Amino acid sequence: MAAVTTSAERSLNKLAIVGVLIVTMIFLAPIYWIASTAFKPRNLATTIPPTVVFQPEISPFVKLFTKRSQLRTAPTPEQYAAAPWWERLVFDGGEKVVRSGRGEVQWSGYPSRFMNSLIVAITSTILAVGMGTFTAYGFSRFKIKGEQDLLFFILSTRMLPPVVVAIPMFLMYRAVGLNDTHWGLIILYTAFNLSFSVWLMKGFMDEIPKEYEEAALVDGYTRMEAFFKIVLPEAATGIAATAVFCFITAWNEYAFALIMTNRRAQTAPPFIPSQVGSGLPDWTVIAAGTFLFLLPVAIFTFLLRNHLLRGMSFGAIRK
Amino acid sequence: MTQIELRGVQKFFGAVQVIKDLNLKIDDNEFIVLLGQSGCGKTTTLRAIAGLETIDGGDVLIDGKPVQHLKAADRDIAMVFQSFSLYPHMSVYENIAFPLRAMRKSKAEIDGEVRSVAKVLQITDLLGKKPSALSGGDMQRVAIGRALVRRPKAMLMDEPIGALDAKLREEMRAEIKRLHIKQGSTTIYVTHDQIEAMSLADRIVIMHEGVLQQVGSPSEVYTRPANLFVAQFVGSPVMNVANAAVTMNGSGARVTVDGAAEGFLFPAELVGQLDAANVGQDRLALGIRPEGVMVSREPAYGYLPVEAHIIEPLGSYDIVDLKVGAQMLRARTRSGFVGKPGVQVFAKLDPAQAHFFDTTSGNSLGVRL
């Protein structure tokens, strides 16, 4: 094919670029909304029409991380002068930071909820992708009796909307003491993601020529060594793609986290809307919490973007 | 010193028997080629020796010890795959060093051995590259290097140059032969290309539908094929085969191919030898290679008039189709010897190059004239 473009094709190309820009803007609009609200003063967060130009401030983040209470009377100038800069931002909002009897700042629940989210999402992703990779390897490389039926059974676990089983799960978890524990959520999310992980990884495993391992077997390695030295590096793209999807699912899960946890193991999604402010809803604090919550997924996806792009088109090209 | 022996090896894939009672003894330093069409069981045999395939019966012996229960890693055999199977995420150096790392050798030892193998194969300048940056021939050299580097008891090669283009294949063929002469390791080589087999092998093992057909030196299988399959599989162009009738005529025998008016002249001993073989006339087939069909432009004693059909000029020689009765007999002539299609020429068969087969069993009757 000669690389000749006609003027009609060129204008079509420009049109396509405009189209892509519009779609991108539609997708990014909610994220812009959250990010901008996270840096707005409280009184500008809910104006109609929305405020677009404003002086950004970080008071929403200070409020997000601290426990606050309403000020009944304005702080005295001495109190105001003695407070660190970030505490003054809270004073300015008509609230004060709660301190213990010894004067220590009381943290809000957000940091621990955020940590819970990280612990639950990372652990369940490692488990789901790890088990999925091994299972997929087994299905891909060995003759297994009833392979098709087993694979269908694994897939069928995704055919029910998970929320349908929320109540029975809750009762079972309460009976065995998994309510409001990290492991409770980890097991749940691993179970959600496992079927997805097995199916996705099976596709990737099937693409890796058997001969690589056979070469390693003849070269003097055991099957396990061949798996770790040859198959895993070859499957890196698939593992990355699967991990991103599993992580996002576990990270964003709301319904089960709301039902199964309330304090110790609560993740960020059910926590953020519950902390709408000490008085009236403070949308800037919610936006700040949501904004920080978006970052890990964005960073994770960004770091793995090359693998992801290859992962999406894997198997589409005959090598 | 490595000898490999297969004793009554059987292999099934489900209900299909892919190797049927295979017996074969391979001597030290021998270059053996397993030759056959795809699906004949040659690759399965190779994989069974490597330990990548279990066998359902019989023994695989290396240096007299049964190894069929050993894992591939414990058989000390190297293999070169058709697809080369270079590990894509490793450099050429790492690929060649990989088998040595399995032996837990020191860094210095590994480095020395990788470099010396690279030198032999003239790939030293490629050591830092990834396999994806290599040409087909270089990939092949690296794959051979990876197999050679740990000095295995035996080398197995599964159509190692089948994926290369024709010119490169010829080059690599010569290189594999050179390497074998230099390194002298017991080698089993699988191919469906009879030219490769002829040019490389000390002995060729021809297989068909899981059954060993013939084992012999390239010239043996070429000049004395054990049966019709071998006769027609080895040699290019293919051997002419036609049903034939033998009659005594005066002092000599006449061999008349199906539908021909006249028979070719053969020595009288033919009749005696055929009688000894005890095969009915209706089961007799004549086989003769194109170079055994002699062509003359002038009538001569013993030559029958025939019509030239298609002429394939192949540079150094021509292949001419001659119409004899209902058959086409392909003859090999000097290039340009037969002017054009349609002319009448005269043909004779060289009795020394004629083969006779039992059409029912396909076996050669062992006639030597």
Image (cartoon, coloured by chain):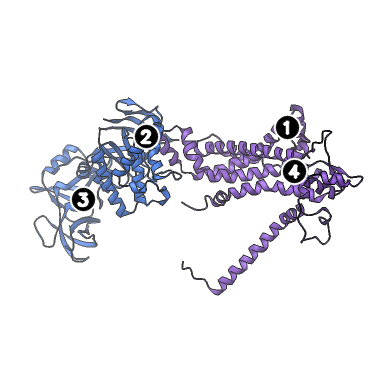
Give how far apart the Cα atoms at labels 2 and 3 are: 37 Å
Return the residue at label 3.
B289
Q: Secondary structure at mark 4?
A: helix
- Which disc, if any, is residue A181? 1
Q: Amino acid at mark 1?
A: Thr
Quadrant of the snapshot with the C terminus of chain B: top left
Residue B145, how many percent across, how many down?
34, 42
Return the residue at label 2.
B50
- Which disc, if any, is residue A269? 4
> Along the horizontal axis of the image, is A174 left or right of A199?
right
Give how far apart the Cα atoms at labels 4 and 2 are: 56 Å
Q: Amino acid at mark 4?
A: Pro
Nearer to us of marks 3 and 4 is 4
On whether disc 1 and disc 4 are found on a single subunit, the reply is: yes
Which residue is rendered at x = 83% and y = 49% of the image? A282
> Could you tell which of marks 2 and 3 lies nearer the N-terminus?
2
Residue density around tag 2, few if under 14, some if 14–19, many if 20 or more, within 10 Å: many
Residue nearer the viewer, A264 or A250: A264
Q: Secondary structure at mark 1?
A: loop
Q: Is residue B160 visible?
A: no
Which chain is the one coloured purple?
A
Residue A297, how many percent across, how many down?
66, 47
Give how far apart the Cα atoms at labels 1 and 3 are: 83 Å
On whether disc 2 and disc 3 are found on a single subunit, the reply is: yes
